[in-house]
Image: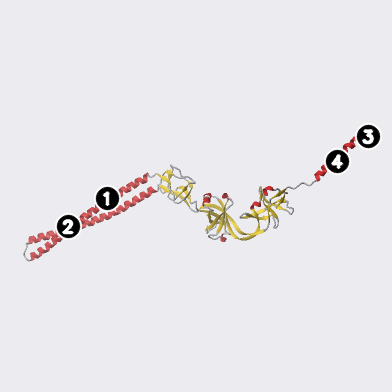
Amino acid sequence: MKKAVLVFLIGFLAIVPSSCGKKEEAAKPEKIPTVKGIEGEIVKASTFENYFEAVGTVRAKVSSILSSKIMGQVVGIHVREGDRVKAGQLLIEIDDRDGKAQLRKAQAGLDEARDMAEEVERNIQAAEAAKQAIEAEQALSLATYSRYKSLLEKKSVSQQEFDQAEARYRAKTAELARAKAQIKSLLSRKEQAGARIEQAQAEVTVAQISVGHTRIQSPLTGVIAAKQTEIGVLATPGAPLLTIEDDAHYRLETAVEESLLGKIRLRDSVGVFIDALGPEEWGGRVGEISPTSDPASRSGIVKIDIFSKGMKDRPLLRSGLFGKARFPSGQLTLIAIPVKAVVQKGQLRGVFVADPANIVRLRLIQLGKSYGERVEVLSGLREGEKILVAGLEKVQDGFRVEW
């Protein structure tokens, strides 16, 4: 029995020191991770230019929908959607056989009218020459008639001789009258021939224009935004074939609440942001303000001319892009922090706030408008608190930081 008690006491004493050691280890404080090289910023209020926003869609300032002026089959398309074209460049060809046949017919009519005019002109020249000869003969017959009349009074010539002289004079006078009438008739025919030439020339011009309409050229330098036809399709007057946009001048067409329209003036500078092209700001200027409001949305259209940041950026713009315009509206004092200080956790946003012991905690905040590289804080921060603005990827909630 004594041996059993002794063995129990020895085992108990062996166990007791081991248990005490474990309790001492658990009582040791856990070491807090420390991160160095962190940048911070004291939260304080600042003054910014206030603004209000309006959303809209990018549109080309100049857009042209091309259609045929004649009916005919499309036999050639020389561009595709997205191609850049120059003013005057050939885009589409339409079957021109009918037009060319009309042109040949009109040209033949013009040639015939010109031949007729030339023939009339030759006849007029011949009639003028004949009239001059008759005038000379008529003048001679008049002189003879006058002399014989005087001689008849003196009984120096017979009555028969006088009658013959008078008959020649009257014949030449009648012949001269006929020559003048013929010339007058020829001059009338000349006027008719001239009118016929003008009509034929007009017909030729119409036929030439009709043939010209079979070759559709670009009216401006830009980009093919849409192609609404294919080879073999029957083109009809007014039916759209191509849409061309001037890709050097774009606008953002925004819908602005009617209560804010009075704050906008023509040529006001406006910040433009195109979501698909990144966070950078594009320059803009108010180009047009609609004089009417939409009764359904209670808003008016404001068109803002967009200034690209450089020639290399122009191809980035295109019709249909979503954009926002920021209209300035005075100054405002508020708390704003660097955008890079914001931590995104799903749908939540927060910042790392350092306490007096430099232990950081992730605190949820509510954000407002953006002002360049800073964003407004609506709630969650107070002036005087210190937040992390760089090196956020190194820290976690509860870490100690060294600045």
**Which residue position is annotated with label 3?**
2
Q: Check disc 3 and give the amino acid type.
A: Lys
Q: CA distance from mark 2 to mark 4?
A: 162 Å
Is residue 339 among what the camera can see? yes
Sequence-first disc among 1 and 3: 3
Q: Badge 4 local density, few (<14 within 10 Å), some, or many (20+)? A: few
Q: Nearer the viewer, mark 3 or mark 2?
A: 3
Q: Amino acid at mark 2?
A: Ala
Q: Is residue 395 left or right of residue 227?
A: right
Q: Are marks 1 and 3 in contact (CB under 8 Å)?
A: no
Figure quadrant of residue 23? top right
Q: Nearer the viewer, residue 231 or 353?
A: 353
What is the x, y in percent for residue 53? 59, 56
Q: Name the residue tied to disc 2.
A: 133
Image location (x, y in percent) of residue 158: 6, 62
- Coordinates of residue 369 in the picture (x, y in percent): 63, 55
Instruction: Give the alpha-carbon distance from disc 1 to disc 4, as whole Å.
Output: 137 Å
Q: Earlier in the sequence, mark 3 or mark 2?
A: 3
Q: Which mark is residue 137?
A: none
Real-space Cα separation, disc 3 to disc 4, in angstroms = 24 Å
Please name whichever residue, 397 or 259, is drawn nearer the observer in this view of the structure: 397
Judge the density around disc 3: few (<14), some (14-19), many (≥20) Cα neighbours within 10 Å.
few
The label shown at residue 17 is 4
Eye-nearest disc, 3 or 4: 4
Gap between marks 1 and 2 measured at Cα = 28 Å
Marks 3/2: CA distance?
182 Å
Q: Which mark is residue 115?
A: 1
Label located before the other in sequence (1 or 4)? 4
Rendered-image quadrant of the N terminus: top right
